[in-house]
Image (tube, rainbow, N blue to C red):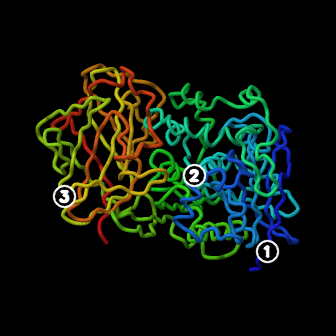
Amino acid sequence: MPAYALLREKNVRFSASDGTVLSANVYRPEADGRFPVILAHGIYGKDAHFADAYKLQWDKLQELHPTLFKEGTSGRYARWETADPEKWVPEGYVVIQVDARGTGQSPGYLDPFSPREIQDYYDAIEWAASQPWSSGKVGLLGISYYAISQWLVAAMRPPHLAAIVPWEGGSDHYRDWSHHGGIHSNTFCEGWWPRQVLPNQHGNGATAHRDRETGERTTGEPLDPMQLEGNRAAYVDEIGRHPLDDAWHTQRSPRLERIEVPVLSAGNWGGAGLHLRGNIEGWMRCGSTRKWLSIHDGTHFESFYLPEYVAMQKRFFERYLKKVDNGWESEPPVQLSIRRPGAVSVRRAETAFPLPRTRSVSFHLDAEKGALSERMPSASAEGHFEAATGQLDFSTPPFEQDCEFTGFVSLRLWISSSTRDADIFATLRALDPAGREVIFVGASEPVPVARGWLRASHRKLDETRSTPFRSFHAHNEVQKLAPGEAYCLDIELWPTCVVLPASYRLVLSITGRDLQVEGVPGRILHTKSTGLEEYSGRTSVRTGGKFDSRLVLPLVPGR
């Protein structure tokens, strides 16, 4: 394969379907011919260098992998969460990064994940496919925002879209992004909006970075504050105005069954609360017959750029953008990083997810003993905690042999509340033989084994989408509690993968608030209900007898 020289074309303009002019940076081979396109469309600024806009993450990446971006050979055009052109253009790809409407050099009304923004993405794909240097085949690649929007635009079926690689990005605006179990996940968006979005708003000259080569403002000439405010949606406030999964959320969630192009969906075991559930759900429910699921661990900004994962991305696109018969279609449909305490994860191929050989094992809660037992207690018992401060722990005995749990986790919990509602935070933790908690590297922060959430008034299930191994909630109405009366809650914990050695044990912690890893302040919290009387009562957990509260885990038999 020839190593093509890179030609950069900055601020290439094109018109969206409503006439608004959008701006793109094009990185392409400096050669005659037509080449496939790798495109990203988003709000983080096509001209803001990774090291300038996200210095903390850039420095950490250099610390973890000092040779990843060698000075003079790559990284000059590195952007947050998008493909590095210097790793793709030499191999015969065009890399395009588009400033979404209302951001960077693209004027207009900033409205994240809105139908208008996704229509612009569709228009960008079709524009790129029609250019003289384009082969007419377009692939999408990017992390987080650049992944979420891939699911959305792929469901619109742009004619020239050939394949997508959504890397750590949700596929359900309500359940993955804004509400967990019906509980408003507010702190991430409240920090993300002013720190990562508004600095890139078109005309925000006060906080804009400058292009490293030209010195130009990355967001264009400054507008006054009133113009800036009038040119954007009140996105964070809007989330608060839509506590149910209504039409506003539905417009920002893809119809996954409409996605027919090849899909490589990559999630992160440590992405609970943002970047895990949606990659699995998107892979399971998308309509494509050519789809692969890869789940890794490590930090959110790390795996995407690592050579082994870039090689995976390239093999996938080589097959579907260049039509090279490279054996990709013989790859196992599922590839997982298997986590083990104190050890580097290993990669393992599987034929499906959930794993076909998985055995669902029920651990019954015993409030009298604080235990998780494979035998259901015959006598009923009750445990209590104050929502604002308390905690109930239920522990397995130490495992007699190594145990692997990989897949979906569910919890059936019988509760009553002293008020008309209650928030349940379920945290699954691993303890070593000395009683020390096992903490894993997470996408954004250190994480336990798994987490799940449910607001009791959102307990209604969507029976058509619930399965024996996972609860799926409707979130379309509020069903308040009668104080003191017992209710059965089926709680979805996000999927997990862990191999626990013999003598380790699992602990299920039930609280009425976020339970954080000790010493970690946490980025993805649910604090809007804190202090509100309705969610600050005394919660009782009932076990045994007719109140069979139980944790169901996906046990993978040893090979």
Q: Is residue 48 left or right of residue 302?
A: right
What amino acid type should be assigned to the residue bearing mark 2? Cys
Q: Is residue 163 left or right of residue 415?
A: right
- The span from disc 1 to disc 2 (Cα, nearest Å) is 35 Å
Pointer 3 with pointer 2, Cβ within 8 A:
no
Point out residue 149 in the picture as x, y percentages from the top left corner.
Answer: 64, 47
Q: Is residue 101 above or below residue 502?
A: above
**Which type of secondary structure does the marked residue at label 1 adopt?**
loop
Closer-to-camera residue (456/506): 506
Of marks 3 and 2, the one in the foreground: 3
Q: Give the residue drawn at x 64%, y 29%.
A: 234
Q: Is residue 50 above or below residue 417?
A: below
Q: Give the residue drawn at x 33%, y 33%.
A: 512
What amino acid type should be assigned to the residue bearing mark 1? Tyr
Q: Quadrant of residue 336?
A: bottom left
Work out which residue is located at the far left of the displayed protein and give it: 379
Q: Which residue is mark 2?
A: 286
Q: Which residue is mark 1?
A: 4
Q: Earlier in the sequence, mark 3 or mark 2?
A: 2
Q: Earlier in the sequence, mark 1 or mark 3?
A: 1
Q: Is residue 158 above or below residue 27?
A: above
Q: Which residue is mark 3?
A: 398
Point out residue 312 in the picture as x, y percentages from the top left corner.
Answer: 59, 69
How many other residues sit within 10 Å of disc 3, few (<14), some (14-19) or many (≥20)? some
Q: Quadrant of residue 558?
A: bottom left
Closer-to-camera residue (55/531): 55
